Image (cartoon, grey):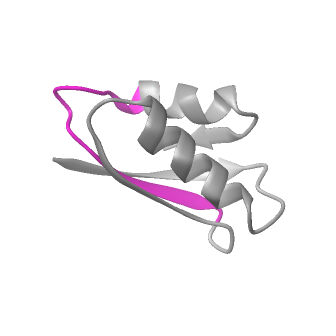
């Protein structure tokens, strides 16, 4: 398992982290957990590098309207 912390741009309310976490956990294989923080404007993702890549995680977040980067 690996952990990545992504900076997220575009979160504007307390429900944004819930949307990001749900998208990452529900649409990608190999995700152990996703914890997004509105206060920190980031998302910490634990994942299996054999099943998913950081680029795929970023793309999933950006697909729902947020900007994500390592």
* Count of numbered badges drawn on the protein: 0
Left or right? Give the position of 45 relative to 48.
right
- Tell me where residue 32 appears, x and y as whole percent: 27, 49
Residue at 62% across, 58% down: 18
Position of 55 relative to 12 (above/below): above
Residue 43 is inside the magenta segment: yes
Looking at the image, the residue that sits furthest to the front is 26
Q: Which residues are magenta?
A: 41-55
- Tell me where residue 26 appears, x and y as whole percent: 46, 38
Residue 37: quadrant of the picture: bottom right
Looking at the image, the residue that sits furthest to the right is 12
Toward the viewer: 11 or 16? 16
Position of 13 relative to 23 (above/below): below
- Tell me where residue 11 appears, x and y as whole percent: 76, 55
Residue at 62% across, 70% down: 40
Residue at 48% across, 40% down: 24
Left or right? Give the position of 52 relative to 61.
left
Left or right? Give the position of 2 relative to 63.
left
Toward the viewer: 64 or 10? 64
- Tell me where residue 34 appears, x and y as whole percent: 43, 54
Residue at 51% across, 56% down: 43
Position of 22 relative to 52 (above/below): below
Residue 52 is inside the magenta segment: yes
Left or right? Give the position of 19 relative to 10.
left
């Amino acid at each position: 398992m690996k952990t990545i912390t992504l900076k997220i741009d575009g979160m504007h309310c307390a429900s944004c982290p819930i949307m990001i976490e749900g998208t990452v956990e529900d649409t990608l294989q190999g995700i152990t957990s996703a914890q997004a923080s509105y206060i920190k404007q980031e998302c910490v993702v634990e994942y299996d590098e054999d099943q998913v890549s950081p680029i795929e995680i970023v793309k999933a977040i950006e697909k729902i309207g947020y900007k994500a980067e390592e």
